[in-house]
Amino acid sequence: MKLARKREIVRSGTTVEQMVRSIADLIITGAMRPGERLDEISLANRFEVSRTPVREALGQLCAIGLVGREPNKSAVVTTVTQQHLASMFEAMAELEGICARLSAERMTVDERRMLEAEHKASAKLVHRGAEDGYEAHNTDFHTRLYRGAHSDHITDLAMQTRARLAPFRRAQFRISGRLARSYNEHDGIVAAILRADGLTAGQAAYAHVSIVSDASTVFARSGND
Amino acid sequence: MKLARKREIVRSGTTVEQMVRSIADLIITGAMRPGERLDEISLANRFEVSRTPVREALGQLCAIGLVGREPNKSAVVTTVTQQHLASMFEAMAELEGICARLSAERMTVDERRMLEAEHKASAKLVHRGAEDGYEAHNTDFHTRLYRGAHSDHITDLAMQTRARLAPFRRAQFRISGRLARSYNEHDGIVAAILRADGLTAGQAAYAHVSIVSDASTVFARSGND
DNA sequence: CTCATGCAAACTGTATGCAATTATTTCCGT
DNA sequence: ACGGAAATAATTGCATACAGTTTGCATGAG
């Protein structure tokens, strides 16, 4: 096969990265189910590249934890046990708690202002019941929390854990009333951060994630049968 | 070049993994300094393989965080700023605290017994001033703590963070009196875990790592000039 | 009919070649 | 002599080729 190039070759190194994104999306959105095989040749054909970049992408996905690999076998979408899923949510809760606590102690005035503004802006989305719009704001809100801790590595751990949990959080806001409750919980976290109350902020953030966990594990279970 | 095989080809997929280990060791032991370039051809010659597995190994090392890569440039040994190093130690302290707290709450009777035995066994090494032997026991001790949390993902995060800190902890026990102090701190953690006092165990573990951090950052600074 | 054995197809792991990009050196103008 | 531009060398990114391993199926024995 002669691999016709879609656009001119740009050698910006983005080829593999885009594939990683695309495949990760397929997994996260559920288009590829846990246990499904990711054979290199099919992916190569699908993305119109050779196997080499496909292998590299699979390597990165493996590092991220979205796929599993063993020697001389096809890569497979990671199958997550209920127990392991629970441990990821537990880790997420601990990390969010840490980030909220540190954010309360360390955020600059600007960061606090931006967090509050961002949070208040999402209020109207709650009233409109706009799940998708709120999801974007929600992601942004949590990212601010991670960065506000002013601790690069902790931010990394939080973002990494969130990425691995992504496949199990889809549709979490479909659960009735979850939108408003999420907003109210954010409200408590923001309030605590604004008054530099690290302890309360941390506990509120921990509880916030734990609740999401409950909602999502139910979803995951019903989705896996 | 014709790439003579040292041993018969074993196709067990261990080739890349071994390279990752070897290169990681070079970095961790300081044989390769931060900022140093890792060019693919040299590594390929050195390990007597082609560039393909070298690239894969570099990809994994990048995922681990030991090397940095940008498009069309050589991989380089990660340069860690003082600030980033501090954030890694901070994360380590938080994670150790969490693990110790959860261990106090969740360890089985057997795990508690093993932890205590392991700890007491290291006492004689302290008296002999055996740094190397104690280091092994120390690693084992902390691994037990991570596993005792009974939360796979938190264990992963802790082990991963410890691996990234490894290059900066070498010789940490050379600092006078550190051995005995470390043992005493472990003692406090073990005692708290044995009486299922999660709060105290967590605080003790947090403090323990923070102290290591102080010792190591000094070392790192003096070592980087 | 069931199970073991061998063969064939499919697929992964590694080597190598070529195109694109970056680094380096050389050469010319000022 | 110095600064900058062009050519050249070095090196990465991707494609393809080939070797080795696994898997599924067919065939035959029990």
Image (tube, coloured by chain):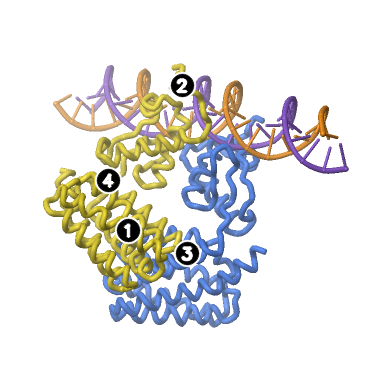
Chain colours: A yellow, B blue, C orange, D purple
For the residue pair A81 and B36, the one nearer the viewer reads as B36
For the image, the number of numbered tags is 4
- In the picture of the structure, the residue carrying the numbered disc 4 is A167
Chain letter of mark 4 equals: A
Q: Looking at the picture, do discs 1 and 2 lie on one chain? A: no
- In the picture of the structure, the residue carrying the numbered disc 3 is B87
Chain letter of mark 3 equals: B
Q: Looking at the picture, do discs 4 and 1 lie on one chain? A: no
Lateral position of residue B121 relative to residue A37, left or right: right
Give the mark nearer the N terminus: 3 vs 1: 3
Percent x, y of residue A107 = 40, 66
For the residue pair B49 and B38, the one nearer the viewer reads as B38
Percent x, y of residue A21 = 38, 39
For the residue pair B204 and B110, the one nearer the viewer reads as B204
Question: In this view of the protein, can residue A221 be seen by the observer?
Answer: no
Disc 4 versus disc 1: distance between alpha carbons?
Answer: 18 Å
- In the picture of the structure, the residue carrying the numbered disc 1 is B152
Q: What residue type is labelled 4?
A: Pro
- In the picture of the structure, the residue carrying the numbered disc 2 is A5
Question: In this view of the protein, can residue A212 be seen by the observer?
Answer: yes
Tag 3 secondary structure: helix
Tag 1 secondary structure: helix
Q: Which amino acid does label 2 sit on?
A: Arg
Percent x, y of residue B167 = 56, 61
Q: Looking at the picture, do discs 2 and 4 lie on one chain? A: yes
